[in-house]
Amino acid sequence: MIEIDLDQTTIRDLNQRLHRLPADTNERAWHIFNPKGRHAIAVGLDLPITIAIDGHVGFYCGGMNKQAEILINGHAGPGVAENLMSGTVRVRGNASQSAGASARGGLLVVEGDTSSRCGISMKGADIVVGGSVGHMSAFMAQRGNLVVCGDAGRSLGDSIYEARLFVRGRVDSLGADCIQKEMRAEHLEALAKLLDRAGIRANPRDFKRYGSARKLYNFNVDHAAAY
Amino acid sequence: MTVDPSSLRPSHSFPPQVIQEIHRAADQGVYEIRGFGAKRKLPTFDDLVLLGASISRYPLEGYRERCDTNVVLGTRHAAKPIELKIPITVAGMSFGALGAHAKEAIGRACTAMGTSSTTGDGGMTPEERLSSKTLIYQVLPSRYGLNPDDLRRADAIEVVVGQGAKPGGGGMLLGQKITERVAGMRDLPVGIDQRSASRHPDWTGPDDLTIKIQELREITDWEKPIYVKVGATRVTYDVALAVKAGADVIVVDGMQGGTAATQDVFIEHAGIPTLPAVRLAVEALKELDMHRKVHLIVSGGIKSGADVAKALAMGADAVAIGVATLIALGCNRPVYVEDYHKIGTEPGYCHHCHTGRCPVGVTTQDPELEKRLPPEQGARMLKNYLTTMTLELQTLARACGKSHVLNLEPEDLAALTVEAAAMAQVPLAGTNWIPGRNGY
């Protein structure tokens, strides 16, 4: 276990050390203390290592992560796991806005709530939120799955493309071109697997599925009011 | 009854083109979307002239005395700044808007000339990375194709906040250009209209931008210069905020800047021309004592070595060209005229990049049309054009007595119109009057 105290080590030194690890490194378990809301902690990683961060992190923790498993024992600032490629980022607490923005792969788990725009522009990742998400979540979401075990704020899935949204609680309102869809057996099965991967106990049958009506994919003057 | 043409009186408020546009809107119920850049008459660098040397200034001998053109960009924070042999770069244009042949031709020509090319809204293709010695990688609001491997493969990173053709607006690529390859790179279905967001998904204001730039530097180990590109609107504030956010290089794109597909109303009615934008950007940098420390690239309608010389004289460190690049590759060349007619236009007037039916194979994904632009041939034409621009630039700089093109200065300029004098803040030719100075 490698221990890093961010009161003693700069973010730049930490990230460069993580980036320079060889593929066959034995330094596969890292423990980071005193993040104190600092930004860009453990960004751009590309090795199957584990990182546990004790405390709250600022913007973009785990940004563009590949392969690594990052655990945040605290709350996360904006853009946690932005553009996630693969691996896992787990937030034990709450996350601020734009959690998992443009994430392409891997799994982001927020055990608490997230603020607005969770999963904005997501492109293939799986995002599981144990609590609720704020307004405009999954805005322009292209691919992947967003699971919300609590409620969703207004304009969920506005201008959504092919992403799948599962919400257990109340949805304040749906955004442009986002509609409720039938929950078929294949969706129940996929959702059960997602919840299992996220380690969150919930019954898939309690969720509703939302997705794109695909009416705005090509301009039609009769749908102009929907924009 | 025959009509006497001299009896026909067009309306100034509703000339034939306005009438045609109202009819089109009534038929289709949607704004016109098109490519190219602003077509309206605007103040440009043509409204300035360079004051060649005579008795009070000493010229350099043409063809004999050296006039250097190299520039280094991004020295503020980056460990590996960009070194270019000429101050003329190629602006960001996406794979999707352009075909693979055009992207490869641009990369080859830029490599041969020792300058940089830029990716676009759609990510980096292997062909353009392979063909481009110096490649600038754009990070756009859509984040199409964005990944950390390409960030690290790039030579510099350009955070695109806005574009001169549509400041405040997002990108647009219509379904007819979305082939399987383009769709795959953008994680979207084939054939749908792709309207990119106008705001970045994970930051909103200048303080956030500071942190975003920090993240990009951390991911790339502080090696790459970070550019910030803005469409020219509130240039003074945008440049100051980009400096504050930590940019190494600022790209200011005037309203003449081109686009592959945008609403005509946006192209013609939003933003300010390149001419005043350069002056405002330079003033903002000087105000912060950052001129020549944070480097300035200007773009939007630049077409000749004379334009480059004037932009540098006003204080820019380099320029970027987009539409002119496409024209050098064959855009609007009078060949395959029947194909221009099929899309309802003529050579010289075509702005139909949005259709994907580019008659000369530049802005298309159609393999048959792309064959009309062999990459080797395109690279040769663009290299010739860049060479010509560089020779023009050196000729003018030597005539002004400069041994390096970056030594050109505002004192080398005069304006031909009151508007240009006011916008560029150089004297109206034949006077010492600069509108707005000293209370006049």
Image (cartoon, coloured by chain):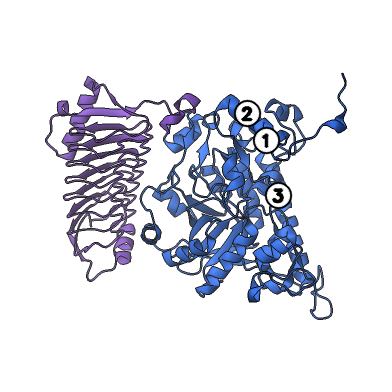
User: Which three-letter amino acid code belongs to the residue tagged 1?
Assistant: Val
Whether label 1 touches label 3, CB < 8 Å: no
- Outermost residue on the bottom side: it is B56
Report the chain holding disc 3: B
Quadrant of the rendered structure where residue B22 is? top right
Report the chain holding disc 2: B
- The 10 Å Cα crowd at callout 2, few under 14, some 14 to 19, many 20 or more, is some
Q: In this view, does B129 lie to the left or right of B421?
A: left
Whether label 3 touches label 2, CB < 8 Å: no
Q: Is residue B113 left or right of residue B221?
A: right
Report the chain holding disc 1: B
Say which of marks 1 and 3 sits in front.
Answer: 1
Quadrant of the rendered structure where residue B429 is? bottom right
Kind of element beneath mark 1: helix
Residues indicated by labels 1 and 3 sit on the same polypeptide chain:
yes
* A3 and B323: which is toward the camera: B323
Query: How far, Cα to Cα, is label 1 from label 3?
Result: 16 Å
Q: The purple chain is which one?
A: A
Q: Mark number for residue B24?
A: 2
Q: Earlier in the sequence, mark 1 or mark 2?
A: 1
Q: Which chain is blue?
A: B
From this view, report whether residue A64 is shown above or below residue A33: above
User: Which three-letter amino acid code belongs to the residue tagged 2?
Assistant: Arg
Residues indicated by labels 1 and 2 sit on the same polypeptide chain:
yes
Kind of element beneath mark 2: helix
Q: Earlier in the sequence, mark 3 or mark 2?
A: 2
Which residue is label 3 attached to? B41
Query: How far, Cα to Cα, is label 3 from label 2?
Result: 23 Å
